[in-house]
Amino acid sequence: MQVGRSIINISVPKALEEEISLLAKQEKKTKSELLREAFSNYKFIKRWTKIRSLGQLTAEKFNLESYDEIEQFAA
């Protein structure tokens, strides 16, 4: 085992495992690489969802209705 790495086991339906294996092969990646990338993308989406939500709340709070108004407010 490599230093700084941990092994985790997950349970997935057989059909999902087959999809993961096929996609990993198509992408010329290991299943581990594919799942690490998927988790990284998941975290990115979660962060952007939170940022967009905060932006929406800010726009509502300051009654900003257009992107131009938002850009002027942010400048």
Image (cartoon, grey):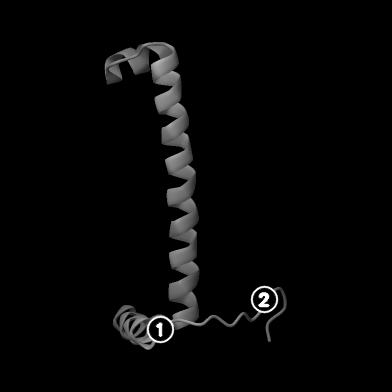
Q: Nearer the viewer, residue 66 or 75?
A: 66
Indicate whether 11 appears above or below 42.
below
Q: In which quarter of the image is residue 24?
A: bottom left
Residue that mark 1 sits on: 13
Indicate whether 18 appears above or below 75.
below
Residue reaching furthest to the front = 13
Q: Quadrant of residue 62?
A: top left
Indicate whether 2 appears above or below 36.
below
Amino acid type, mark 1: Pro
Secondary structure beneath label 1: loop
Residue that mark 2 sits on: 5
Query: Is residue 75 at all visible to an observer of this figure?
Result: no
Secondary structure beneath label 2: loop
Residue 68: give x, y in percent of width and height.
28, 15
* Quadrant occupied by the C terminus: top left
Amino acid type, mark 2: Arg
Residue 31: give x, y in percent of width and height.
45, 82
Alpha carbons under labels 2 and 1: distance apart: 25 Å
Indicate whether 38 appears above or below 27.
above
Tell me which residue sits at (50%, 54%) in the image: 43
> Which circle, 2 or 1, is nearer the viewer?
1
- Total marks drawn? 2
Tell me which residue sits at (44%, 15%) in the image: 61
* Quadrant occupied by the N terminus: bottom right
Whether pointer 2 and pointer 1 mark residues with C-beta atoms closer than 8 Å, the reply is no
Which label is found at residue 57? none
Q: Earlier in the sequence, mark 2 or mark 1?
A: 2
Tell me which residue sits at (39%, 18%) in the image: 60
